[in-house]
Image (cartoon, rainbow, N blue to C red):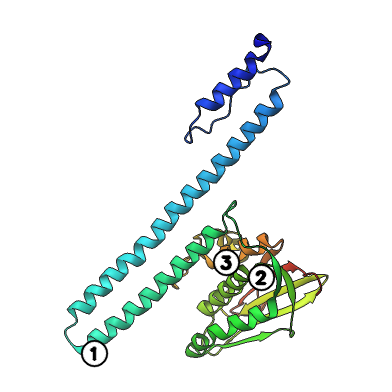
Amino acid sequence: LKRGLAPLEATSARVHERDAARLDPLPKDGVPAELLPLVEQINALLARLALALEAQSRFVADAAHELRSPVAALALQVQLVERAPTDAARATALAELKLGIARTGRLVQQLLDLARLEPGVPSEPSEAVDLAAVVREVIGSFAVRADSQGVDLGAEAPPAMLVTGRASELRSLVANLVDNALRYAPSQSAVTVSLRQANGAVELAVEDAGPGIPAQQRQRVLERFQRVAGDSTSGSGLGLPIAKAIAERHRGNLVLSDARPGQEPPGLAVEVRLPLGEGA
């Protein structure tokens, strides 16, 4: 009996000797055929863990890199406030400092949102969410900013539209899309958020009249910290990836296209398709 169980004890010892830093696969040499499925499943788990740790490490490195610049800018702006020779110069420096704090706060919030969307992170339970109410709430929160930019921000939505999901995440999805649209929308243009039911699904679309995204770069900008080549606007490249991750967590998808095909500028249309909620 001891001789028969020796391969199992050897495999158990190999697993016991591992620490968190060793994620290379267990050797399969000499493992009995009866134990091979178990060893292969353990190796598959180790491979998934290695990918998850690599993604986490890359996220931390990217986040540190993205935070370095705004924090350094804040330190510089504080020095400008301290050294301002006149009250007018001090007021101008303070205004720039407040904008810098707001931008940094927005980046930190986006990083937190992205961290919560990592695989394996517990989330609040799903429930029936009125996406039309979420859209109206988000539109209201951006109304002052849109007005200051000279942008007509409006919504085309039914009185109610139910989806099954997490209200906080869906609110973040809409907010990131509206924020992104306002960032690129020129003055005296419009940003429209539309919501409708089509083909058994809910379609949420946010359209602007900005420069748009070339077709060959659309997949790239859906990755973290990636932006359109030559883009000089302030931003972190996280808004669209966050929206995409939330859509996928809700069994939906996100597609980019031209808002005004054939026109210049073409604008950007971001369409999110989500399953229709029960009772809708």
Circle 1 — which element?
helix
Q: Do the residues under discs 2 and 3 have CB atoms within 8 angstroms?
A: no
Between marks 1 and 3, how big is the CA–CA gap? 38 Å
Is disc 3 surrounded by few (<14), some (14 to 19) or many (20+) residues within 10 Å? many
Residue kind at label 1, given as amino acid type: Ala
Residue marked by disc 3: 240
Front-most of residues 136 and 237: 136
Residue marked by disc 1: 88
Q: Nearer the viewer, mark 1 or mark 2?
A: 1
Nearest to N terminus: mark 2 or mark 3: 3
Task: Give x and y (percent) for residue 19.
Answer: 48, 32
Residue 40 in sight here: yes
**Looking at the picture, does residue 70 appear above or below residue 189?**
above
- Where is the C terminus found, in terms of image quarters? bottom right
Q: Quadrant of residue 76?
A: bottom left
Task: Give x and y (percent) for residue 175.
Answer: 57, 75
Residue marked by disc 2: 257
Circle 3 — which element?
helix
Residue kind at label 3, given as amino acid type: Leu
Please give the label number shown on residue 56.
none
**Is residue 30 found left or right of 102 in the rendered image?**
right
Residue drawn 80% across and 69% down? 278
Circle 2 — which element?
strand
